[in-house]
Structures are given as structure tokens and as C-alpha cells.
């Protein structure tokens, strides 16, 4: 009897875990990230949420048995469990978001500017770079995609259904965005003990723990540089844990070292969790790291590299 694809991919995840347990992998290493990717691939093979949860539970039980004598590896197993549950949520958040002939007009520098018509679609687990010159309409398009602006022409479709005034608020909750005009609140709303623990880990990962802490349900300070404030805004987006991230020139205020961390570590980790990420960027040296590049010029898509992934074939590479 042939072995099913979910079992094959589940075994792949376990083999990656075995390498971790054999001291041949550390957090951030290729094997460590391979395990997260394997979890994502396994979840993509499971169509029903209940089956997905059972598969995750079986995998975690195997991990627990392997790491029961080691507190360090137990923490790694917990990290894998968090990633798996995030994948399970993402798997059922949306199948496809499509912009069908979307247009939007506004006045800029005293002249009317028309964005579109735009035909574009997104599926779970892909990283898309939105590129183009200043004033080409990238941020406006991103705000249309996220539902902050309503299209004046054309339609936005969520899994084939038009997004209208009645469904727009629910649609917006698919997105976490950090735009250039972002605003930070000191208080973190709806945070619990698990979220605080996650926030502490993220402060370390974002190299902010020496500057700011989470004190109860609030940040200890917002007196930070612009680049550090953007990292804190990204932390808030991580805590929201929504399926679609929009990051508008996020890396522009980062130093070269952390800019590289953003493109080569943070974005692949979001992809490994099954997140869709739209990155507005001028950093052309990193464009090859995305699944697709979409180029805007004077409000029109003039070039697109890479293929739109079908939902049945979404998997990190």
C-alpha cells in the first residue's frame, strides 16, 4: 500500500527534528528551518481542520517523547508546536485573494492620479515584492489590498466572493500591516501570559531587549530610533498573528546588518509559518528572495516575475 503524502512529509519533519536532537542543528540553522517548512508542507496536504489538528498532535507527541529529558529541546519542541498551530490557522484563513480590474483615483501634487486597472492575486505562503519608483502607487495599492481603501472600479474577491461594505471589516482582519505612517501604542491590548512570553522572545530576536521590555500589558518605553520603532511595530504585527502581512519600506530605516536579517531570516520564517507577505521595497539586491516581484509604474503593473502559486501547490522552497 503506498504511503500517503502527509505521512511522507510528516516523516520528513521528524527526520529534521532528529537532526536537531542529535546536536547537528541550532535555532536559525538550515535543519531548524527545514523542520518548520516540513510542518507547513504536511499541513498543506491535510484538507480538513480536524485532520490537521490530529496530525499536529501526533507530531508533537513524537517530539515530546524525544525531548522529555532535555529542557532546551523541550523549548524547541514548543516552538515547533507554535509554528504548527499557526499553520493550522493560516491554512483555513483564505485560499485566494484576487484583485479584478481594481482602480482608484486621487489627487497628488494638484493633479489627478489613477491607479490601475490592477489584476493581481495572492495565496497563502508566498512572499511578494512590490517594487517601482517613488510615486508609482505602491502604498496606495497596498492599502487597497488590505481594505483600508475601497476600490472605485473593479472588485476584490476573497475566495471568489466580492468584498463589499458589509464584509470589508472582516476582510481587514486578515491583515497585519506596518506602513510608513504607522503609530505605536504603549499598551498591548488583549495580551495574556503566553503573548507576554512570546513578546519577550521577539524582543530578543529583534535585538530590542536591551532597549525596551514588556511591563505587564505595556511597553516600558517608546523612546527609540525610527528603525527600532519599526521593529517594535513588527513585534505587534507578530503578536496579532494574522495570515497576511504587509510591510511598507520596513527595512529602509534598519542598519545594513539587521536589514539582512530581515530579508534572509525574518521573511523566510514568516513564509515557513504559512504567512503571505507583501513587501514594498527598493532593496533590489534581495528581490531574488521573493516568490514574485510585481513592478508598478505610474499606477500600472508593468512587469511581474515568478509564477502565481496554485493553492494546491503552496509550499516553501
Image (cartoon, rainbow, N blue to C red):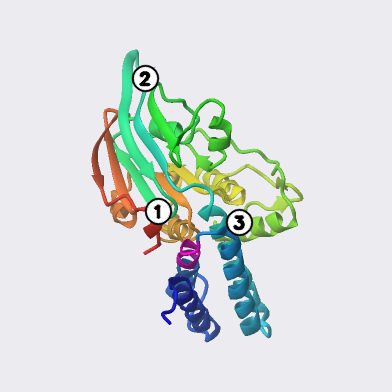
Q: Position of residue 153 (x, y in %)?
A: 37, 22
Q: Position of residue 13 (x, y in %)?
A: 49, 75
Q: Dot 2 surroundings within 10 Å: few (below 14), some, or many (20 or more)?
A: some
Is residue 207 at least partly visible in the picture? no
Q: Tell which of 66 and 297 is nearer to you.
A: 66
Q: Position of residue 82 (x, y in %)?
A: 61, 63
Circle 1 — which element?
Answer: helix
Q: Work out how far the residue at label 2 is from the one at label 1, CA to CA, in angstroms.
A: 32 Å
Q: Position of residue 8 (x, y in %)?
A: 44, 76
The disc placed on residue 73 is none
Residue at image mark 2: 105
Q: Tell which of 39 and 280 is nearer to you.
A: 39
- Asked which quadrant contains residue 121, the reply is top left
Q: Give the residue at x 71% y 58%.
A: 194
Circle 3 — which element?
Answer: helix
Query: Considering only order in the chain, which callout, 3 or 2, is on the residue closer to the N terminus?
Result: 2
Asked if marks 2 and 1 touch (Cβ < 8 Å), the reply is no
Quadrant where the image shows the C terminus = bottom left
- Asked which quadrant contains residue 114, the reply is top left
Height in image: 231 above or below 68? above
Q: Work out how far the residue at label 1 is from the one at label 3, CA to CA, in angstroms.
A: 33 Å
Residue at image mark 3: 203
Quadrant where the image shows the N terminus = bottom left
Height in image: 96 above or below 146? below
The disc placed on residue 311 is 1
In the rendered image, residue 213 lying in the magenta stretch gets the answer: no
Specify the segment rendered in magenta: 40-46
Circle 2 — which element?
Answer: strand
Asked if marks 2 and 3 touch (Cβ < 8 Å), the reply is no
Q: Tell which of 253 and 66 is nearer to you.
A: 66
Is residue 95 at least partly visible in the picture? yes
Q: Dot 1 surroundings within 10 Å: few (below 14), some, or many (20 or more)?
A: some
Amino acid at each position: 500500500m503506498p504511503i500517503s503524502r502527509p505521512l511522507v512529509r510528516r516523516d520528513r519533519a521528524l527526520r529534521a527534528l532528529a537532526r536537531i536532537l542529535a546536536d547537528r542543528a541550532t535555532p536559525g540553522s538550515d535543519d531548524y528551518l527545514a523542520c518548520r517548512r516540513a510542518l507547513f508542507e504536511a499541513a498543506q496536504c491535510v484538507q480538513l481542520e480536524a485532520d490537521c489538528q490530529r496530525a499536529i498532535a501526533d507530531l508533537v507527541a513524537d517530539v515530546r517523547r524525544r525531548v522529555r529529558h532535555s529542557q532546551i529541546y523541550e523549548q524547541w519542541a514548543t516552538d515547533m508546536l507554535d509554528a504548527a498551530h499557526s499553520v493550522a490557522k493560516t491554512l483555513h484563513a483564505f485560499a485566494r485573494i484576487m484583485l479584478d480590474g481594481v482602480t482608484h483615483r486621487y489627487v497628488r501634487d494638484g493633479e489627478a492620479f489613477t491607479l490601475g486597472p490592477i489584476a493581481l492575486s495572492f495565496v497563502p505562503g508566498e512572499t511578494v515584492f512590490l517594487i517601482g519608483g517613488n510615486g508609482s502607487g505602491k502604498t496606495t495599492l497596498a492599502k487597497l489590498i488590505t481594505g483600508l481603501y475601497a476600490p472605485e472600479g473593479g472588485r476584490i474577491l476573497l475566495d471568489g466572493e466580492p468584498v463589499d461594505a458589509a464584509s470589508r471589516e472582516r476582510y481587514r482582519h486578515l491583515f497585519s500591516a506596518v506602513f510608513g505612517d504607522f503609530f505605536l501604542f504603549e499598551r498591548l491590548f488583549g495580551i495574556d501570559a503566553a503573548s507576554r512570553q512570546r513578546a519577550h522572545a521577539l524582543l530578543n530576536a529583534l535585538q530590542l531587549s536591551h532597549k525596551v521590555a514588556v511591563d505587564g500589558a505595556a511597553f516600558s518605553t517608546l523612546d527609540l530610533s525610527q528603525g527600532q520603532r519599526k521593529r517594535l511595530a513588527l513585534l505587534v504585527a507578530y503578536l496579532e498573528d494574522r495570515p497576511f502581512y504587509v510591510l511598507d519600506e520596513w527595512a529602509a530605516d534598519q542598519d545594513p546588518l539587521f536589514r539582512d536579517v530581515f530579508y534572509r531570516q525574518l521573511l523566510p520564517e514568516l513564509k515557513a509559518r504559512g504567512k503571505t507577505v507583501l513587501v514594498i521595497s527598493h532593496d533590489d539586491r534581495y528581490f531574488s528572495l521573493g516568490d514574485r516581484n510585481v513592478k508598478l509604474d505610474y499606477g500600472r503593473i508593468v512587469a511581474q516575475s515568478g509564477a502565481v502559486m496554485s493553492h494546491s501547490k503552496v509550499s516553501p522552497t
